[in-house]
Amino acid sequence: QKEVEQDPGPLSVPEGAIVSLNCTYSNSAFQYFMWYRQYSRKGPELLMYTYSSGNKEDGRFTAQVDKSSKYISLFIRDSQPSDSATYLCAMTSGGQNFVFGPGTRLSVLP
Amino acid sequence: NAGVTQTPKFQVLKTGQSMTLQCAQDMNHNSMYWYRQDPGMGLRLIYYSASEGTTDKGEVPNGYNVSRLNKREFSLRLESAAPSQTSVYFCASMGGDRGLMSKLFFGSGTQLSVL
């Protein structure tokens, strides 16, 4: 079993839809959870950052962490074609070791 | 505001050739990283440097060497390239107080093909 699991997609949705992206993990030591967005032929860019369990909202994006279930989610409201990218979850216990999911490729169709 | 800068952006090598990937950051970060990204595998850590003068192996270090030249620069060297090293390579640096604000900032990547 991989340390971090993520549905690779691809996921296609119509413009305006609510998108739900998810990751599960096995290491209970993880405390910091991140979502990165990666456009084609670009480096990952930090989108959302949360510590421990709970929700965090930033504009159309909401990150959710459920440590009891070892499950994190990213919700995108009113999705736009510009949201089309690969979304990577990442997590760390606070040291140098960041563990990434394989990424979910999202296409938002106009 | 350059952030993390990598060179070159693209490179084609023949098996057995050597090359060095360069990385520099201007955010005064202590920690720097080299990752490779392969389809379906996600980002895998090759080497990292927690501070100037120190380097440590990551998940997939075989076939690579690194040098932390100074606080800004962290280079990755392939001594004898193999087709299995065909990948996209990303350099990153970590900002924030360790344990409280651990955030990775990435460069734009190097697409490497080994024939």
Image: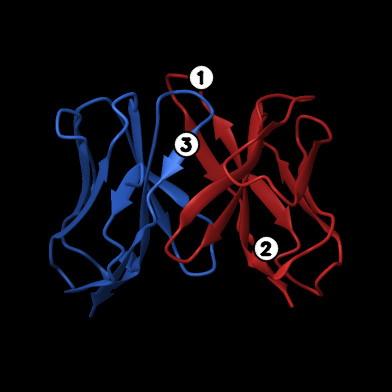
- Judge if badges 1 and 2 mark residues of a common chain: yes
**Within 10 Å of the Cα at label 1, are there few (<14), some (14-19), or many (20+) other Cα atoms?**
few
| Camera-side mark, 3 or 2 | 2
- What x and y, as percent, mark residue B66? 78, 41
The type of residue carrying mark 3 is: Phe
Drawing shade for chain A = blue
Q: Is residue B83 left or right of residue B45?
A: right
Instruction: Verify CB contact (< 8 Å) between mark 3 and mark 2.
Output: no
The type of residue carrying mark 2 is: Gln
Q: CA distance from mark 3 to mark 2?
A: 21 Å
Q: CA distance from mark 1 to mark 3?
A: 15 Å
Is residue B38 visible to the viewer in this orientation of the structure?
yes
Residue occupied by mark 3: A98
- What x and y, as percent, mark residue B73? 77, 39
The quadrant in which residue B92 appears is top right
Q: Is residue A87 left or right of residue A68?
A: right
The structure residue drawn at horizontal position 36% and vertical position 40%, both measured from the top left corner, is A34
The structure residue drawn at horizontal position 69% and vertical position 38%, both measured from the top left corner, is B26
As drawn, the residue found furthest toward the front would be A1
Tell me, what colour scheme is on the image?
Answer: by chain
Chain identifier of the residue bearing label 2 in the image = B
The quadrant in which residue B109 appears is bottom right
Residue occupied by mark 1: B97
| Camera-side mark, 1 or 3 | 3
**Measured along the vertical axis of the image, is residue B107 above or below residue B95?**
below
Find residue B85 and name its label: 2
**Within 10 Å of the Cα at label 3, are there few (<14), some (14-19), or many (20+) other Cα atoms?**
many
